[in-house]
Image (cartoon, rainbow, N blue to C red):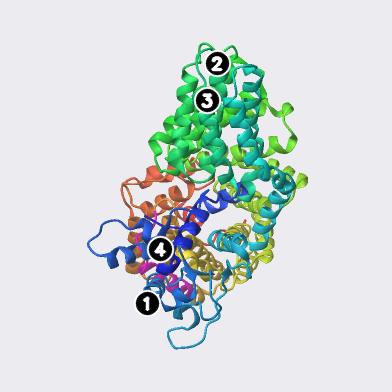
Amino acid sequence: MQYRAFISHSHDDAKFAAWLQRALENWRVPRRLQQRVGYSRIKPIFRDRTDLRAATSLGEQIEAVLTHSDNMIVVCSEAAARSEWVEREILRYRELNPAGQILPLIVSGEPPYCFPRPLIEDADGNALEPLAADARKAGDGRRDAVLKLLAGLIDVDFDELKQRDFQRRQQRLTAVAALSAGVAAVTLYLAYLAYEARDDANRRREQADDLIAFMLGDLRGNLEPIGKLDILDAVGDKALDYFSELEGEDITPEVVLKHAMAMRQIGEVQMARGDLSAASVAFERSLAALGSIRDTHPEPISVVYEIAQNEFWLGNVAYEQNDAEQRTTRLKNYLAGAKALVALDPNSVISQQELAWGYGNLGVIALEEGNFGAAERHLLQSLKVQQALNDRLPRAQQLEEQQSIYSWLGEAAYRQGNVSDALVHYENEFTALDEIVQLSDDMLLRELLSSNGMRLALAKLYVGDHQGSLNDSARAYEQANALNEYDPENFYWMRGRVQCATTYSRSLLHAGDESAAFAVMESLAQLPREVRDAQGGRADAVMSYLDAVSQRALSQWALGDLPSARAGLAEALAFARDQPEPNVTINADAFARLYLLAAEIAEHSSEGVQARALRQRAHAVLRLPEQPSLEPSSRVLTALVLDKLQLEGATLAFEDVRSLGGAVDSSEALAQLAGVRVPAKP
């Protein structure tokens, strides 16, 4: 298992460490950051007092977890500074993860006396000055300290994260101050209404129902952004007591529906607090209540809607619990509920929007599972429904919903090798993004535009549209440079700049501008190595580094500087030899391209034996013929390997590359398309 972070703490700080673990794991990554980061929660986080399982040796398991932790958080106090255990964990983490990030967090004591020795002194005895978040009241305070940790964990600027948090809190702070103070009194009043004498019962019940709905709905919306959902625990308990006391003629279908809605809202509160078990129980109880009135309630659409919502939330619980089978089952049930809503009220915007989301959820699941055909079918259905809603939604919402679907559709088509279809979807995504930026510009939208431009440029290379590729890659490169300049320490924007520069340089070579192609790669300086070594050597960072080295060497070869090209490749080849087996879905193509470019240069230098050995390494990296990929890059590299090694299937693979849409009529043209041979002048 891979952990987002390892919390190292002394025994005296165990209570704070437990709180910190919950706070970090319960925090949800902002929606616009989720696609970049790749996850919605900062979990799992390892804390030894809660996460250790039986093992042959405590030390062996700690080391295994340290090896598989992306970051280390050190809870700093005078007790931690005295702890040999904390010191050993820090030292061992540095040995096992030399590129790993260590984030100190002060909870008590004064710097530097609260810091464990490895944080203030290196192996040679030189003084260090750690930058630490400070949870003390006299420092950042708990909230800002946690935000600083979160900014470091997901590599986002702290000020940006704090501004988003501040805006959400300010919008609700005035209302919450009054509402929170009155919760206890309102809860007592609810109890009074629920248990008062039977006279005037209907009026009292309606008032109690309204209070429950308010506290679990509107009040929850004000409490959630400032982390005060625990206030609603007593409200939930009173609501359950109230409904359990109803009997006889009081238990009407309308009352049962309100009970079910309250249970679902309680489940959402528990979900937001990170208590998945309690949330699941609440959603299941809500479903059971709804099942009893589905055929008797005077407004069946309300019952069907609530059933669908519970299925959706149970799918989210399954996702957080890594239960893929249960997630798929629940989200299929959610889609079935959305279809039932549309059957009951075809003209409802809510029903149609639920249907679009239902198809979209299943499309994303299928894409994650590699079932691209099913992903495309579901996503196209989602798009069809969404487009039918266009005139009934605010423009910004229309664009955001469609942009997301177009992006997923483009990926599904591209990964199947349907480049022409992918281009259509990516162009539509760009159109939507470009308009969204005009309505509400921010840096995260710029990041999406940059990624979109890079995908368009690569796809156009494979269909032979070199001018279109040049235009799109230039746009992506400009956006990526602006993002990196805005925040030079942001890993994702560092990686984006390297990737966009590599794509732009490749397009410039195909346009015949060798000098500009080299200048773009030269402008990166040491950035590819910095990306490679960041984030613990993750697969996508290694991919970016290898592709950049290969493209730089190719541009040097284009300018006639073969010695420099070979020197750069030699460094990358040495690095590649020490790496674990490439990830076939992330960076195998980058390793193969490196080997094939080195082989082309070796062959050009009359080193035939070396060239063949390098091509055989590329063949092994691509795992042929056991795991052929449908993606254009992999198909081109596969065809080149089979052609150069004169292996079975070479002719068929050659024809397969032609089907992508480009004019590939020779082995040399195939090598140029693969990015391992200097393209012919246009």
Question: Of label 1 and label 3, which has the lower sequence position?
Answer: 1
Name the residue carrying label 1: 84
**Element under disc 4:** helix
Q: Residue at x 55, y 16 (%)?
A: 250
Question: Of label 2 and label 1, which has the lower sequence position?
Answer: 1
Location of the N terminus by quadrant is bottom left
Decide if residue 490 is on the left or right side of residue 656.
right
Q: Is residue 172 visible?
A: yes
**Region of the chain picked out in magenta, as a range:** 566-583
Name the residue carrying label 3: 243
Name the residue carrying label 2: 250
**Element under disc 1:** helix
- In the image shown, does 579 or 418 lie closer to the viewer? 579
Magenta region includes residue 73: no
Residue 102 screen position, x and y as percent: 49, 70
Q: Is residue 346 visible?
A: no
Residue 574 screen position, x and y as percent: 39, 72
Decide if residue 186 is on the left or right side of residue 129.
right
Labels 2 and 4 touching (C-beta < 8 A) = no
Give the Cα separation between the discs numbered 3 and 4.
Answer: 69 Å
Name the residue carrying label 4: 595
Numbered mark located on residue 499 in the image: none
Q: Amino acid at mark 3?
A: Phe
Q: Residue at x 61, y 38 (%)?
A: 424
Give the Cα separation between the discs numbered 4 and 1.
Answer: 46 Å
Residue 248 screen position, x and y as percent: 50, 13
Q: Amino acid at mark 4?
A: Tyr
Q: Amino acid at mark 2?
A: Asp
